[in-house]
Image: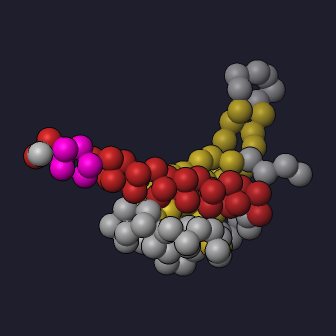
């Protein structure tokens, strides 16, 4: 009986994490699609512990099964060299950070990507 209870809890925790990850991934894709991609964007102090405040946007009505709407933040661009060819080629790359919740407030996933918007 104890084994079944432990397995049920593990399955429930995995489902919570999966829902939170899907919410964060959806917010990340919306952030990459819509921006804002401005040089005046503010950087997050610590993306891993970001609580979602000051976000650039959220996805309202994402899913009734999550504890809160997924949110995203676009940071200031970094001027990054791309490739090893000469002459050197540089591009603006924006960090996009997203935060998603599972069915409970304690199920949190934060994901981040480095994104180059199309001109």
Left or right of 5 in this view: 106: right
Report the quarter where the N terminus lies: top left
Of residue 41 and residue 51, the one placed in the foreground of this image is 51
| Horizontal and vertical percent position of residue 95 | 60, 54
Q: Measuring 50% from the left and 68% from the top, which residue is drawn there?
A: 65
Q: Residue at x 37, y 69 (%)?
A: 104
Q: Residue furthest top?
A: 85
Residue 22 visible from this viewpoint? yes
Say whether residue 82 is magenta: no
Viewed as shown, does residue 62 lie left or right of 53? Answer: right
Write the start and end of the magenta stretch as one range. 4-9
Left or right position of 68 against 77? left
Q: Position of residue 111 (x, y in %)?
A: 51, 52
Query: Outermost residue toward the front?
Result: 1
Q: Position of residue 18 (x, y in %)?
A: 46, 50
Residue 6 on the magenta segment: yes
State the scheme by which the image is colored.
Answer: secondary structure
| Main secondary structure type of the part rendered in magenta | helix
């Amino acid at each position: 009986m104890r084994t079944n209870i432990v397995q049920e809890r593990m399955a429930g925790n995995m489902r919570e994490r999966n829902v939170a990850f899907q919410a964060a991934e959806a917010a990340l894709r919306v952030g990459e699609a819509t921006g804002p991609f401005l040089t005046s964007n503010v950087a997050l102090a610590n993306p891993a512990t970001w609580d979602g405040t000051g976000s650039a946007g959220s996805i309202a009505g994402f899913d009734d099964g999550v504890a809160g709407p997924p949110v995203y933040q676009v940071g200031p661009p970094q001027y990054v060299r791309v490739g090893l060819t000469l002459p050197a080629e540089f591009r603006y790359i924006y960090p996009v950070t997203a935060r998603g919740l599972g069915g409970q407030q304690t199920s949190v996933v934060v994901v981040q990507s480095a994104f180059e918007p199309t001109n």
